[in-house]
Every structure is written in C-alpha cells, then in structure tokens.
Amino acid sequence: NFLQGIIRQESEVVSTITAICALAIALITSALLPVDIFLVSFMKYPNGTYKEWAANNETRGQIEDTVLYGYYTLYSIILFCVFLWIPFVYFYYEERDDDNVNKCSQVKNALKYTIGFAIVCVVLLLIGAFVPLEPPPSQNSTQWEKVQYLFEELGSSHGLPALSFSISSLTLIGMLAVITYTAYGMSVLPLNLIKGTRSVVYERLENTEDIDDVEHQIEKLKSKCNDGRPLSSRDRHNLQELESKLQVLQRRGRHLEIAERNCCTKVGSALRPIKILLGIFFILVALLFTVALFISNLDKALHSAGISSGFIVFGTNLTNPLNELLLALQPVTKDVLLCYLEIYDLFILNCTLPFSLFQLYKIRPKRTRPQALLFLCMILLLIVLHTSYMIYSLAPQYVMYGSQKYLVFIRMFLCFSLSPPDQCIVTRSYLFLHKFWFFSTIYYFGNWAFIGAFLIGLAVSCCRGKKSVIEGEVEADDSDLSDDEYVH
C-alpha cells in the first residue's frame, strides 16, 4: 500500500506539472492575439495617419516580425505538447496500469506510441511546406527545378505554410471540441447558476425513501428462498441489480450527509443572489456571441466570394454588434476585453467538461486519473487553437485590422480586406488562420454547427430541472473505496 501510494503521488505530480505547463502555454497563446491587434492599432492615430515612430516601413516590419516569431514559438510549443509531450506522459501512465510491466517497458511502449504521433506531425508539416499555394512560374520546368522552387518557397516564407497547415489541422479537432463542449457549456452553465441546486435536506429525505424501498424489494426476493429453493436466474439477476442500486444510494446518502455539514454548501446558499446575477451576465454574453456569429455567417452567405475562396467577405456589409462593441471600447480597454472573451471560452469549457454528455474519463475533485487530466489538457490546447479563429468569426474586421483607419482625400474609412496594403496592416494571426482557403470553408460550416449546438443545449437546459448538490460525485461504476479518497 505504501509503494502504491508513492507511485500514485508521482503520477499526480507529473500529470499536474504537465497540465499546469500546457494550460500556461494555452493562456499565453490566447493573450498574443489581443497584443497583435493592439500593436497594429497603436501604430496609427485616430485620424488614420501613422504615428512618427511607425511611419518607417522598416520599423513596422520589425514589429510585425517580432509578433510573427512569437506565433512561431508558441505554436511550435503547442505542436510539441500535442504530438510529443502529452502523448508520451499519457501512454506512460496507461502502461503503468498494468502491474506486470516494468518501468523500462513502460518507457519503450510510451515511446512507440509517441513516435506514431510524431510521424503524423511530420506529415502535416511536409504537406503544408511542399504543397505550394501557387503553381511554379514555368510549367515547362524540369523536375529538379520544381523541387528547387518548392524549397525556395519554403525558405522565403520562413516555414509559415508548414506551421499554418499543421495548426489548422489541429484546429479542426478543436472545432469539434468547441461544438461538443463549449456550445453546450455556454447554455448549461448560466442556466444552472440561475436555477440553482436542489435542497440537500429534501434530497436526503428522498434518498432515504429510495433506500427503504430497495431494501424492501431485496427482502421480498430473498424471502422466496427461505424454504431452501434456489432463486431463478431472473430473480438472481434482479437481486444483483437491486444490491448494486442499494450501494449507489448508500454512497449518495454519505455524500449528501457530508454536503449538508459542509460550510461551502451554506455559503453557496447565502450567495444565491450573486449566482443569479452571474448567470444572467453569462447568458447575455453567450447570446451576444451567438448573435454576432450568426450575423457574421449570414454576411458570408450573402456577400462572400463563394465557397472556393473560403467565404471571404470584402468589407462589412451587416452590422456586427460584437465588432462594433470592441471598436468602441478599444481606446479604453486596449484590447484587454478581447483577452477576457477568450478566457471566458476556456472558463466555460473547464466548468462544463466534467459534466458533458460525451465523457471518456471522469473528472472529479481528488479522484481524477492522470490520463483524464492529460486528456483535458489536450482538449484545452485544441480549444485555444480554434478560439483564435472563432474570435475572427465573431468580429472579423476588428481581428484583421483592429481600430485602424485610412484616409482617402479628406474622408476617413475603417480598414477592411480591400484597403490599400500600405495604409492598413493586417494582424499576424490572420496569416496563420487564412493561409489555406479550404480550412476557412470548413470553419464556416462549423460555425453553423456551433450555433445549432448552442440552441439545442439551451432548449435542453431550459427543460431540465435543478441539478443535484452532489452532481457528478457518485456514479454507478464507482467502488465504495472511492469515497475514502474524496474530500469536500
């Protein structure tokens, strides 16, 4: 038992360190987008002219390259985490679950599976690097000249297409996670805060009645064999189910008793008005997100250049409320509000992931397996990758150019896709998000799926009653020993 405790403690420490580092990288990557937008906006005065220090093209180029190298570094670290670090730690602890495997075999097997992930990463990088976006200048070139052209393209772009293709491929997986978890969470979390939880006293009374009822059924079945006759196979099966149900109810009773004595439950009841206000705030933000995303997608459907262009829109044809809000608050918030919106997405995901309808692992206090924690980190990293594009969908003009304006004679206009390149500087994040048009097309249809998932989640959440005060703490496949590991 002592040795098992040491092994478990080591597993928790390593997985926790991995989770902290991965989450830190995710948050830093999220914070780079507001910095990118702030820098391109800060280069100009409100009247559309460049500031003195930014009037030189070389100075602007240095700033753009610095931000670009920041994206290179952070996205490369994310690739390392997704394809090497997290898979190795994950499979290492998967092998540790087998008592017959020694440490050397664990490392070998973990490396074997990790190499598979590394190969996928290399393939994605090669596809992005050596599939040119434009054909060679001469169709009569020799095979060597074509290969030479590909390497020259790779060198001139500093590997941007390779990294962009890899990140965009991972973003597609992140899009599925956003549709599955975040869309659901944006509706269920606010409504749960507004509705609150069931009364602990009432739940205990109801649970006690259920225990008495199940015990009565068990005694009734056992009474059939008082005369020495064995129970039929059907009765034995029913008896096993009733005994399993009784164990679950007894565990629920113990957890409800602890929850009733817990001071956090009493404090939560006292803070009920604040929870309602937070729920109202979160649902208003969620509705703002959904409306902005719908207007952006509707604008692309009506005014874009078509599916073959990635539904690119030249200018803003429909008023986007979130885009206008960010533009109005940019002089005051300096793009900090945009950072808060990204953190809000991560917060929604983190709060609802343990109670999602699609669970591969249980995530509960003091009883989360290392693999579950690593799996959560992987999802968070992929969510962050897709969050950057989703912010673009919510406020496209703002994410591309910030609050930049340019002058045409004496009139001033907001920068947009057809603005003069020397008058409007595109954010570096846009280079990563829209290097390949077919990814933008998939994102467009993914946004419609997100809106649909949010509306479905909203309808389901409205129909559901209040959740239990011990929601997610007791499951049918738990053991009695798991209660000893739980600490309120």
Image: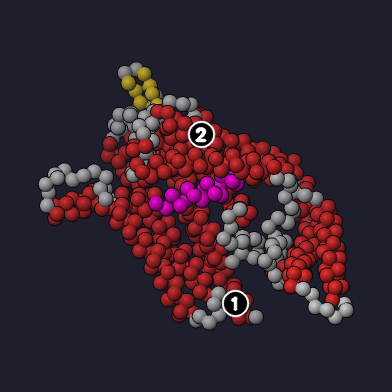
- Would you say the magenta stretch is mainly helix, strand or loop? helix
Circle 1 SS class: helix
Q: Which residue is drawn at 24% across and 43% down?
A: 134
Q: Please name the residue that numbered disc 2 is placed on.
A: 294
Q: Which residue is drawn at 85% across and 73% down?
A: 224
Quadrant position of the N terminus in the picture: bottom right
Quadrant of residue 4 within the rendered picture = bottom right
Residue 12 among those drawn in magenta: no
Residue 218 as seen in the image, left or right of residue 324:
right
Disc 2 and disc 1 in contact, CB within 8 angstroms: no
Query: Mark 1: few, some, or many residues within 10 Å (few <14, many ≥20)?
Result: few
Residue 17 as seen in the image, left or right of residue 474:
left
Q: Residue at x 87, y 73 (%)?
A: 223
What amino acid does circle 2 point to? Answer: Phe
Quadrant position of the C terminus in the picture: bottom right
Residue 251 visible at all = no
Q: Residue at x 48, y 45 (%)?
A: 387
**Picture coordinates of residue 290 (x, y %)?**
55, 36
Decide: is 57 above or below 315: below
Q: Please name the residue that numbered disc 1 is placed on.
A: 6
Circle 2 SS class: helix
**Picture coordinates of residue 390 (x, y %)?**
47, 42
What amino acid does circle 1 point to? Answer: Ile
Highlighted magenta segment, given as a residue range:
169-186
